Image: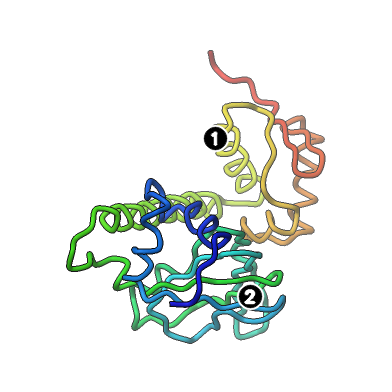
């Protein structure tokens, strides 16, 4: 095993897949998972489209951008990940499926990889903390599936306005308020909703003029009368 520092343990224990696992159990657990720790410089590729993997990645430090580039060279940012986030878990479970995305270091970063088969299979001692790890990983799959289903609901709306309203309605429900902040800038929101940035900006202006919303940067307010 690569040397795991106290700083590494802090990032690992804050990852969702190690939820409710005692810090003292993390090092023994890692011994079962064939971990590898590697550093990457900003802009370098961690994973490449077309390759096959059997490991899940956990960010020890820094940030990672997941993006897709089609055969015409069009780039789409799928997500931006930071310390303690995990990625590539779905591909690691289906080892005969090539990656359809690249994982690129958005900043200098350190990545811990763990063999997915060993993550999802209890060790001979059937330790309790490994059972928790499996449960946590299943929760990750469930949450990402829900998020994917939600995105499909947004982007399959008939036009840009309805896509925006679908997303903003969800965010309003999530925060329980007509006023909220979204985690995207304009380009990121356009990418998320699969629309052109210019079309998105134009539609937001029209929606504000129509009295549906008001906004400043990533802060939005919906002007919709809710039934009591």
Left or right: residue 175 versus residue 119 is right
- For label 1, the residue is 174
Q: Nearer the viewer, residue 215 or 41?
A: 41
Q: Nearer the viewer, residue 147 or 128?
A: 128
- Measuring from the top left, give residue 207's x and y in whole percent: 75, 39
- Numbered disc 1: secondary structure: helix
The disc label shown at residue 29, or none:
none
Q: Is residue 47 above or below residue 184?
A: below
Number of numbered tags placed on the structure image:
2
Instruction: Choose top left, top right, bottom left or bottom right for residue 114.
Output: bottom left
Q: Residue furthest top?
A: 228
Q: CA distance from mark 1 to mark 2?
A: 30 Å
Q: Quadrant of the N terminus?
A: bottom left
- Numbered disc 2: secondary structure: strand
Q: Report the residue at 49% width, 86% height from top.
A: 50
Q: Report the residue at 54% width, 76% height from top.
A: 101
Q: Nearer the viewer, residue 47 or 166?
A: 47
Q: Report the residue at 26% width, 55% height from top.
A: 131
Which mark sits nearer the N-terminus, 1 or 2? 2
Mark 1 residue crowding within 10 angstroms, few (<14) / some (14–19) / many (20+): few
Q: Is residue 27 above or below residue 186?
A: below
- For label 2, the residue is 104
Q: Nearer the viewer, residue 97 or 25?
A: 25
- Measuring from the top left, give residue 51's x and y in whole percent: 47, 86
Q: Are marks 1 and 2 in contact (CB under 8 Å)?
A: no
Q: Nearer the viewer, mark 1 or mark 2?
A: 2
Q: Is residue 54 above or below residue 27?
A: below
């Amino acid at each position: 095993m690569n040397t795991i520092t106290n700083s590494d343990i802090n990032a690992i224990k804050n990852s969702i897949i190690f939820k409710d696992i005692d810090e003292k159990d993390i090092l023994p657990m890692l011994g079962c998972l064939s971990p590898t720790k590697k550093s990457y410089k900003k802009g370098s590729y961690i994973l490449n489209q077309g390759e096959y993997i059997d490991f899940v990645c956990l960010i020890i430090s820094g940030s990672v951008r997941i993006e897709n580039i089609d055969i015409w060279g069009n780039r789409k940012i799928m997500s931006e990940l930071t310390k303690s986030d995990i990625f590539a878990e779905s591909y690691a479970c289906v080892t005969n499926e090539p990656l359809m995305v690249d994982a690129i270091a958005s900043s200098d970063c350190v990545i811990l990889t763990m063999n997915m088969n060993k993550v999802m299979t209890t060790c001979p001692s059937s330790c309790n903390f490994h059972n928790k790890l499996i449960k946590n990983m299943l929760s990750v799959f469930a949450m990402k599936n829900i998020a994917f289903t939600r995105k499909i609901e947004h982007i399959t709306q008939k036009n840009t306005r309805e896509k925006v309203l679908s997303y903003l309605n969800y965010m309003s429900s999530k925060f329980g308020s007509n006023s909220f902040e979204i985690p995207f800038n304009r380009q990121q929101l356009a990418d998320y909703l699969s629309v052109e940035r210019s079309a998105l900006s134009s539609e937001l202006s029209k929606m504000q003029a129509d009295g549906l919303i008001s906004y400043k940067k990533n802060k939005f307010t919906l002007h919709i009368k809710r039934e009591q």
